[in-house]
Image (cartoon, coloured by chain):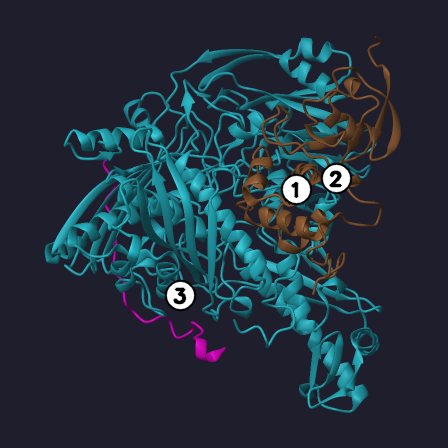
Amino acid sequence: MSTEEFSVIGKPLARVDAWEKVVGAARYADDFFLPRMAYAKIRRSDHPHALIKRIDTTRANALPGVYVVVTGRDFPAVRFGILPVSQDEEALCTDKVRMVGDPIAAVAAVDEETAERAADLIDVEYEVLPPIMSVEEALAQDKVRIHEYGDGPNIHKAVAFEFGDVEEGFRQAALVREDVFFYQGNTHLPMEQHAAVAQWSPDGKLTLWSSTQTPHYVHRALAKTLQMPPAWIRVIAAPVGGGFGGKTDPFSHEIVVARLAQLTGRPVKIGLTREEVFYCHRGRHPVSMWVKTGVTKNGEILAMHFRSYVDGGAYGSYGVASLLYTGALQTVTYRVPRYKFEGMRAFTNKPPCGPKRGHGTPQPRYALECHLDKIAEQLGLDPAEMRRRIVVDEYTKTANHLTITTCGLRECIDRVVEASGWREKHGKLPYGKGVGFACSSYLTGAGLPIYWNDMPHSGAIVKVDRGGGVAVLCGATEIGQGSDSVLTYVVAEQLGIDPKDIRMATADSDLTPVDLGSYSSRVTLMAGHAAARAAERMRILIHEAVAKKLEVVPGELVSRGGRVFVKDDPERGVSFAEAAVLAETMHGTLACAGSYTPPKRAGKFKGSGVGPSPCYSYTACVAEVSVDPDTGEVTVDRVWIAHDVGRALNPLLVEGQVEGSVYMGLGEALMEEQVFREGLHKIPSMLEYKSPTTLETPEIYTILVETVDPEGPFGAKEAGQGPLLPVPPAVANAVYDAVGARIDEVPISPEKVARAVELKKQGKPARVGPERLPVFTFPEPVKVASAFGEAADPSVKRKTQV
Amino acid sequence: MPAKPILTLRVNGEAHEVAVPVHKTLLEVLREDLGLIGTKHGCELGECGTCTVLVDGQPVLSCLALPVELEGQEIVTVEGMAPPGQLHPLQQAFAELGAAQCGYCTPGILLTSMALLADKREPTRDEIRQALSGNICRCTGYTKILEAVELAALRMSGEVAGGKHGRGATA
């Protein structure tokens, strides 16, 4: 790794927030205790689908200690939602509930216990409607509609695209294979339950502290639903105790506490119970998938046709984007010259699905990597070697008009093949032991904003104090991924100072420039660039002042080690603190802003907005498993994973992101599932919703590959989401290597494995997975010429220009 | 017994008098009455390990413990792991090795590890896994947590010099 050129970048430093976190001093949203604070509880629906006929709050209001009880009628009649095209949620439901757990009324009381008791005393009369619990039921029940909008009865969205003539590709193929897969939904399960505290100032301004990954969108939602000027609303994201996408939507409870605080004249706090967190959800969509691929005898893909049937749950959430993501990134990993995608998202009476780590892409990745494993076997090719041959080419476009910059996937493949002893193990281990292989790619920040505009996606201000202290103000949200640390490193490197001399002020809509939020793996690249640019401007001001003092030209100066000095005569220089005084004397108050807007590279067709990114990360993974053929239990013994992160700004933090991604991928592969019975979550507790503990998590061997992408700050790409993607299919392929059984759906539970082993014993096809797909007629595809193999636009920075 | 008996709790070496309803949990009393917000909660049902504190040196889920039963016992929270201004070797190692990401499960894991190291000076990795199997972490994949406990154990047994980076140092 080429870190010698840097003082801070590339060093395995402790996180800047590590110290407050290990002493328990970090203040999460639920840690705010304000004078006169009241506590809120929300009364939620008991029915998955019903009309609200009457809400009687008399008994709740009469309970001593209750300050106020509100229903949906106490709010402006305005809906909200994260996407402009799916404004379908209410702060409190007025006429209809669409899932168990939908908010109906809320209480503010002297303490949490009183609020809870009062919420139970609210009487709700329902007219029960037939619940729709699956995509198939959503399609069959066209007389019962969950929402009045969408692309058909209970169809939130249906899309179809064709890039090049896939049928022609299939005609030329030596092998055409079709497979069907199902990826069960699962949830984020952050350790911190969502919490929010609202407070109004006497002059009518609102402050909300919340455990949110997207304070900017909460700000928008509050302004809209409370019908207030945004200027009077301040949203502060407290450090988030785990997000993984589960705290990226604006939530009803955030709006409710704001209103309750207004009505009571007190600060009001709400903390969700673990059960409520399961119902808030916005996690992994359950997706049924069909994929058809035509290949040459060497495994070169000639055409691919992919269909996804997405179970969206009760609200839109990010669903349109999630749906498009199930189709967008298939082309970014391997060369796919012709590509067709058809997808639909149905509404069902379950908690809404949304973005979870990997947003819409782990499901198709599972399908594709299991599918390719089968193709390799049919062609008699080594699955790792076959993939290595078909990796995308750098600085080209994909069939669906996405631009590839750097791609370190071949090196990732070589490194995990080598480290894992793949060649000695695949197909050669004793019965019950196996290895599986898979690859993936992921975006480094969504190329387009949620609200389409030409403003920056991220901004930062660097302020220098007379004592040499530096403050960085940025809207980025620390959710544990290390955003505060990364921004500190970038500024420290630019100014040549110790990271300890920098203070971060983040995620506060009053004080910090907008950053769109901690989602889509965007913070390191986008906020990193914004902070780097602000710091670079500051360095220019400082060098100008120091150059005058030292009687040199600014170009002769460098900033490093807390000093500003002449490059060729390091003894001639001043401390950073002295430099700050010189600069303030020359320029006045020292504050510089920087911002970042991603390049506009989306294709010229409707629906092209999901998928573009400044650059893509790449990952290769080998999983080694032991399978008990009698019980079907799968034990993952070891995972090797190589990740192309562009450049590791801090290898310790990147490893942490990779290890955490592997862990979360294993949970999805083996045990986690969000399942329902008549609208009720079957297992809404941390005991019953199984997630891996220390005992189920194997040794993880992480390899970082650095391609130094010209699009990223110091060459960095993302690390927080991509490494999850290849893990579930690598496990599935390892199970096949171990016992010869294909499990074409997650979770790969013992019951499914045992059933497949039994089928094999009976001489039947050893496969467990979906037998059929929902019956749905997709719209005519939007036909767009394939851009496959075209050179990236001349505006794309090449490595030689670094 | 009155609805709000006055209890004397010994927390982090200090005696505190509190008057709280008998059903109020230790978790709630620590956070709401004593201002010790370092103790976190993830389920309030005894399932996730996040709220772990030490009672007479043993890990206890504070969401299931009632103060009325804990009078006269020594309660230690994350705030009391080390003397003021100092770090316990576990805290030092967790910070240096990136064992805390979102940091929310960290206090509970630190205290469970502290009890383990009081019991076993040099636990094996499997023994650490066993000891921490009731503490869920969703960020780290546990790898860096296991490494940090091992490093702290080595430093505490004097085999590796401790805290070379020092508190708050970054390079």
Q: Are marks 1 and 2 on the same chain?
A: yes
Residue A589 counted in the magenta span: no
* A465 w.r.t. A377: above or below: below
Amino acid under disc 1: Thr
Which residue is nearer to you in this view: A462 or A568? A568
What color is chain B drawn in? brown
Q: Are marks 1 and 2 in contact (CB under 8 Å)?
A: yes
Residue at 42% of width from left, 26% of height from top? A675
Chain assigned cyan: A
Marks 3 and 2 sit apart, C-alpha to C-alpha, by 42 Å
Q: Are marks 3 and 1 in contact (CB under 8 Å)?
A: no
Task: Look at the image and give the residue range highlighted in magenta.
Answer: A777-802
Q: Which residue is mark 1?
A: B106
Is label 2 in a helix, a strand or a loop? helix
Is label 1 in a helix, a strand or a loop? helix
Residues packed near mark 2 inside 10 Å, few (<14), some (14 to 19) or many (20 plus): many
As drawn, is B16 to the left or to the right of A700?
right
As drawn, is B144 to the left or to the right of A448?
right
Q: Are marks 3 and 2 in contact (CB under 8 Å)?
A: no
Q: Which residue is mark 3?
A: A408
Total marks placed = 3
Which residue is nearer to you in this view: B6 or A134? B6
Chain assignment, label 1: B
Chain assignment, label 2: B
Residue at 61% of width from left, 64% of height from top? A530
